[in-house]
Image: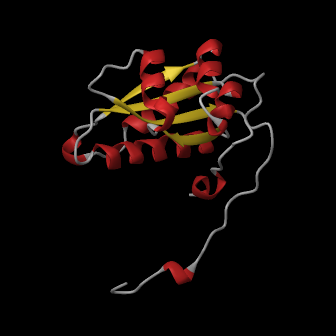
Amino acid sequence: MDEIYKRRSYHDGFDGTKKISDDDINAILKAGMNAPSANDTQPWEFVLINDAEKLQELSSLNHWTRAVGTSSHTIIVCMKPDIYAGIDCGIAVQNIVLQAAHMDIGSLIMGVHDNEGYQQKIKSLLNIPDEYIAYSMIALGYPAETIPPNDKWYPEKIRLNSF
Protein backbone atom coordinates (compact mmCIF):
# COMPACT_ATOMS: atom_id res chain seq x y z
CA MET A 1 0.00 0.00 0.00
CA ASP A 2 1.80 3.03 -1.28
CA GLU A 3 -0.60 5.26 0.67
CA ILE A 4 1.03 4.25 3.96
CA TYR A 5 4.28 5.86 2.80
CA LYS A 6 2.68 8.62 0.71
CA ARG A 7 0.51 10.00 3.54
CA ARG A 8 2.23 13.00 5.11
CA SER A 9 1.31 15.69 7.64
CA TYR A 10 0.76 19.05 5.97
CA HIS A 11 1.53 21.34 8.91
CA ASP A 12 2.10 24.34 6.63
CA GLY A 13 -1.35 24.07 5.12
CA PHE A 14 -2.99 23.46 1.79
CA ASP A 15 -3.79 25.14 -1.49
CA GLY A 16 -6.80 27.10 -0.26
CA THR A 17 -8.02 27.76 -3.81
CA LYS A 18 -8.88 24.10 -4.49
CA LYS A 19 -11.94 22.48 -2.94
CA ILE A 20 -12.55 18.76 -2.47
CA SER A 21 -15.66 17.54 -4.28
CA ASP A 22 -18.67 16.18 -2.38
CA ASP A 23 -18.12 12.74 -3.95
CA ASP A 24 -14.50 12.66 -2.79
CA ILE A 25 -15.41 13.82 0.74
CA ASN A 26 -18.09 11.12 0.91
CA ALA A 27 -15.55 8.48 -0.19
CA ILE A 28 -13.18 9.66 2.57
CA LEU A 29 -15.94 9.59 5.21
CA LYS A 30 -17.09 6.16 4.01
CA ALA A 31 -13.54 4.84 4.53
CA GLY A 32 -13.67 6.11 8.11
CA MET A 33 -17.06 4.52 8.72
CA ASN A 34 -15.78 1.18 7.47
CA ALA A 35 -13.11 0.95 10.15
CA PRO A 36 -13.39 -2.04 12.44
CA SER A 37 -14.56 -1.39 16.00
CA ALA A 38 -14.91 -3.50 19.12
CA ASN A 39 -18.24 -5.35 19.01
CA ASP A 40 -19.06 -3.27 15.92
CA THR A 41 -20.02 -0.36 18.19
CA GLN A 42 -18.83 2.27 15.69
CA PRO A 43 -18.35 4.84 18.49
CA TRP A 44 -17.58 7.74 16.16
CA GLU A 45 -19.55 10.69 14.94
CA PHE A 46 -17.96 12.84 12.23
CA VAL A 47 -18.52 16.60 12.19
CA LEU A 48 -17.63 17.81 8.70
CA ILE A 49 -16.68 21.46 8.43
CA ASN A 50 -16.38 23.38 5.16
CA ASP A 51 -17.59 26.77 6.40
CA ALA A 52 -14.71 29.25 5.98
CA GLU A 53 -15.53 31.15 9.17
CA LYS A 54 -15.57 28.00 11.32
CA LEU A 55 -12.38 26.75 9.67
CA GLN A 56 -10.68 30.05 10.54
CA GLU A 57 -11.88 29.88 14.12
CA LEU A 58 -10.59 26.32 14.50
CA SER A 59 -7.28 27.33 12.91
CA SER A 60 -6.71 29.93 15.62
CA LEU A 61 -6.87 27.47 18.53
CA ASN A 62 -3.08 27.06 18.63
CA HIS A 63 0.08 26.90 16.55
CA TRP A 64 -0.60 23.30 15.49
CA THR A 65 -4.08 23.99 14.11
CA ARG A 66 -3.13 26.80 11.73
CA ALA A 67 -3.35 24.51 8.65
CA VAL A 68 -7.11 24.17 9.22
CA GLY A 69 -7.53 27.70 7.91
CA THR A 70 -6.33 26.67 4.42
CA SER A 71 -8.10 23.30 4.39
CA SER A 72 -10.97 22.55 2.05
CA HIS A 73 -12.67 20.52 4.77
CA THR A 74 -11.88 19.51 8.32
CA ILE A 75 -13.36 16.52 10.11
CA ILE A 76 -13.80 16.47 13.87
CA VAL A 77 -13.99 12.86 15.03
CA CYS A 78 -16.18 12.72 18.13
CA MET A 79 -16.85 9.80 20.44
CA LYS A 80 -18.71 8.76 23.54
CA PRO A 81 -15.86 7.63 25.78
CA ASP A 82 -15.65 3.94 26.62
CA ILE A 83 -12.89 1.39 27.03
CA TYR A 84 -12.32 0.79 23.31
CA ALA A 85 -13.61 4.01 21.74
CA GLY A 86 -10.17 5.67 21.53
CA ILE A 87 -8.65 2.69 19.72
CA ASP A 88 -11.65 2.39 17.42
CA CYS A 89 -11.62 6.10 16.54
CA GLY A 90 -7.87 5.93 15.93
CA ILE A 91 -8.46 3.22 13.34
CA ALA A 92 -11.20 5.32 11.70
CA VAL A 93 -8.82 8.29 11.53
CA GLN A 94 -6.18 6.12 9.87
CA ASN A 95 -8.71 4.90 7.29
CA ILE A 96 -9.70 8.51 6.56
CA VAL A 97 -6.17 9.74 5.92
CA LEU A 98 -5.17 6.68 3.90
CA GLN A 99 -8.22 7.11 1.65
CA ALA A 100 -7.34 10.80 1.27
CA ALA A 101 -3.75 9.90 0.33
CA HIS A 102 -5.06 7.41 -2.22
CA MET A 103 -6.98 10.31 -3.82
CA ASP A 104 -3.95 12.66 -3.72
CA ILE A 105 -5.61 14.72 -0.99
CA GLY A 106 -3.39 15.88 1.83
CA SER A 107 -4.19 15.59 5.52
CA LEU A 108 -3.12 16.68 8.94
CA ILE A 109 -4.21 14.76 12.05
CA MET A 110 -4.43 16.79 15.25
CA GLY A 111 -5.29 15.36 18.64
CA VAL A 112 -7.76 17.35 20.69
CA HIS A 113 -6.51 17.77 24.22
CA ASP A 114 -7.96 19.83 27.02
CA ASN A 115 -5.05 22.25 27.47
CA GLU A 116 -6.29 25.83 27.50
CA GLY A 117 -9.88 24.67 27.09
CA TYR A 118 -9.58 23.47 23.47
CA GLN A 119 -12.08 20.66 24.04
CA GLN A 120 -14.73 23.06 25.30
CA LYS A 121 -14.01 25.64 22.58
CA ILE A 122 -14.50 23.02 19.86
CA LYS A 123 -17.59 21.57 21.52
CA SER A 124 -19.11 25.01 21.87
CA LEU A 125 -18.30 26.13 18.32
CA LEU A 126 -19.74 22.96 16.79
CA ASN A 127 -22.59 22.27 19.25
CA ILE A 128 -21.15 18.89 20.25
CA PRO A 129 -23.34 17.29 22.96
CA ASP A 130 -21.91 16.95 26.48
CA GLU A 131 -21.76 13.15 26.37
CA TYR A 132 -19.29 13.29 23.45
CA ILE A 133 -15.68 14.40 23.33
CA ALA A 134 -13.81 15.68 20.31
CA TYR A 135 -11.22 12.95 19.78
CA SER A 136 -9.29 14.40 16.86
CA MET A 137 -9.33 16.96 14.08
CA ILE A 138 -8.32 16.06 10.51
CA ALA A 139 -7.63 18.89 8.08
CA LEU A 140 -7.99 17.89 4.41
CA GLY A 141 -6.99 19.71 1.25
CA TYR A 142 -4.88 19.64 -1.84
CA PRO A 143 -1.21 20.04 -0.93
CA ALA A 144 0.42 23.38 -1.64
CA GLU A 145 3.82 21.70 -1.48
CA THR A 146 5.28 18.31 -2.31
CA ILE A 147 6.56 16.31 0.62
CA PRO A 148 8.48 13.14 -0.28
CA PRO A 149 7.10 9.80 0.93
CA ASN A 150 8.18 8.35 4.26
CA ASP A 151 10.58 5.44 4.29
CA LYS A 152 11.06 4.65 7.96
CA TRP A 153 12.54 1.35 9.02
CA TYR A 154 14.15 1.01 12.44
CA PRO A 155 15.05 -2.63 13.16
CA GLU A 156 16.37 -1.60 16.59
CA LYS A 157 12.75 -0.95 17.59
CA ILE A 158 11.80 -4.61 17.13
CA ARG A 159 11.99 -6.99 20.11
CA LEU A 160 11.63 -10.70 19.38
CA ASN A 161 9.64 -12.74 21.91
CA SER A 162 10.20 -10.32 24.80
CA PHE A 163 11.25 -6.75 25.38
Q: Residue furthest right?
A: 145
User: What colour-coding does the image apply?
Assistant: secondary structure
How far across and how far down the image is residue 58, in percent? 58, 24
In this view, 1 is above or below 23: below
Q: Residue furthest front?
A: 116
Direction from residue 150 to residue 88 in the image, left or right: left
Most foreground residue, 61 or 154: 61
Q: Residue furthest bottom?
A: 161
Image quadrant where residue 144 sits: top right
In this view, 80 is above or below 111: above
Direction from residue 120 to residue 6 in the image, left or right: right
Most foreground residue, 4 or 63: 63
How far across and how far down the image is residue 74, in percent? 56, 27
How far across and how far down the image is residue 90, in percent? 41, 47
Label total for image? 0
Q: Residue at x 57, y 56 (%)?
A: 4
Q: Residue at x 41, y 27 (%)?
A: 46
Q: Residue at x 54, y 41 (%)?
A: 110
In this view, 105 is above or below 47: below
Image quadrant where residue 35 sits: top left
Q: Which image quarter is the N terminus in?
A: bottom right
Most foreground residue, 122 or 8: 122
Q: Which image quarter is the C terminus in?
A: bottom left
